[in-house]
Amino acid sequence: MFVQVNQLQKRFNDHQAIKGITFHIKKGRCTALLGPNGAGKTTTLHMLAGLLSPTKGSISYNGEKDYRKHIGFMPQHPTFFNWMTPVEFLYFAGKLSGVPKQRLIEYVNNSLSFVGLTEVKNRKIGGFSGGMKQRLGLAQAILHQPELLILDEPVSALDPTGRREVLILMEKLKERMTILFSTHVLHDAEQVCDEVLMLKEGEIKWEGSLIDLKKVFSHTAIHIETIEPIKNAFDELLKPEAIHFTTDNNATILEITPSLQTNDLLTALISRGYTIQRFEVMEDSLEDAYMKVVDI
Ligand SMILES: Nc1ncnc2c1ncn2[C@@H]1O[C@H](COP(=O)(O)OP(=O)(O)OP(=O)(O)O)[C@@H](O)[C@H]1O
């Protein structure tokens, strides 16, 4: 166990934003905190980063009390002094986060090189694109080489190019540190995360690996077309297994449980003399699984 969160709650006046959530973050894994707007993602990340105190509950980081030095945090909208250069900004941030003076130059240069901003390191931040600013935010968050990197909606505000750049950087960072990031964009989560935490209205709706999420919530649909009509031909084959069964002329679409082996179905059809023109296995996307979970 790396980070254990127990019965965490946050109340803003009369609004209970986080309703007693319990989860853990596994060391070395990249976890996506997924949820619609207002689910409580930012509030949860701020509590984990030590920027907001919980109303109730606990966060345990390898048993340490003051764990903030091990955490790197990038807010949803990183703000900069536009008149500063990346080097000046990172020196300033490095001093604040307690990077030893003798290592500061090395750390700043390493971070800038990692996010691809070395060439512009002495230009004013004011002239930077959104993507460059986001990469500078990332450089600041990893500057002190944290064990846990927390990123609040790291790609949501970016155009497709900027999004891709940041996702590639996250993919590389996965080898060096544990990552927790929030997003409401499923496609982005699917590309980079190993673990998923789904949050809705301040409650965890699902926790587990991306692979398990797909297994548990997706259906497999098989689209079959044969030359011979196959209506009612499945009775003995799979009636108890079939969830949904529709036919349209010679096209048959089955939604089956994962327990049924598609190979067995194909073999059975061939051995019964059907001439198969199409046999296509279609799996639900993470988006379908997500919709099922958040609609619980
Ligand atoms: N400082 C605050 N004072 C009062 N209510 C707040 C405060 N911060 C957040 N909230 C409320 O708590 C709930 C959760 O907000 P939060 O920003 O954590 O959600 P989110 O999942 O990050 O949403 P988004 O994707 O829109 O950023 C919302 O209803 C929000 O209005």
Image: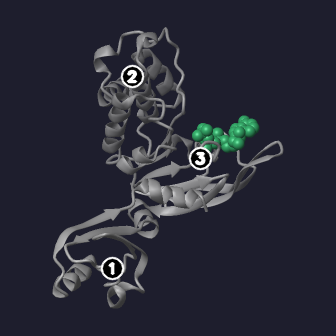
The colour scheme used here is: one colour
* Residue labelled 3 has its Cβ within 8 Å of some atom of ligand 1: no
Q: Which residue is mark 1?
A: 231
Where does residue 33 sit, x and y in percent of width and height?
52, 50
Q: Residues within 10 Å of mark 1 (few under 14, many from 20)?
A: some
Mark before the other along the chain sequence, 2 or 1: 2
**Is disc 3 placed on a helix, strand or loop?**
helix
Corner quadrant of residue 76: top right
Q: Tell me what residue is drawn at x 19 percent, y 87 percent.
A: 272
Amino acid type, label 2: Met
29 or 247, which lies in front? 247
Q: Which residue is mark 2?
A: 132
Q: Is residue 229 visible?
A: yes
Q: Tell me what residue is drawn at x 52 percent, y 19 percent.
A: 80
Look at the image and tell me in which quarter the C terminus lies: bottom right
Q: Nearer the viewer, mark 2 or mark 3?
A: 2
205 or 80, which lies in front? 205
Q: Tell me what residue is drawn at x 52 percent, y 56 percent.
A: 291
Q: CA distance from mark 3 to mark 1?
A: 56 Å
Corner quadrant of residue 130: top left
Taking 239 as reference, is 107 above or below it?
A: above
Proximity of marks 2 and 3: CB atoms separated by less than 8 Å: no
* Residue labelled 1 has its Cβ within 8 Å of some atom of ligand 1: no
Q: Which residue is mark 3?
A: 48
**Is disc 2 placed on a helix, strand or loop?**
helix
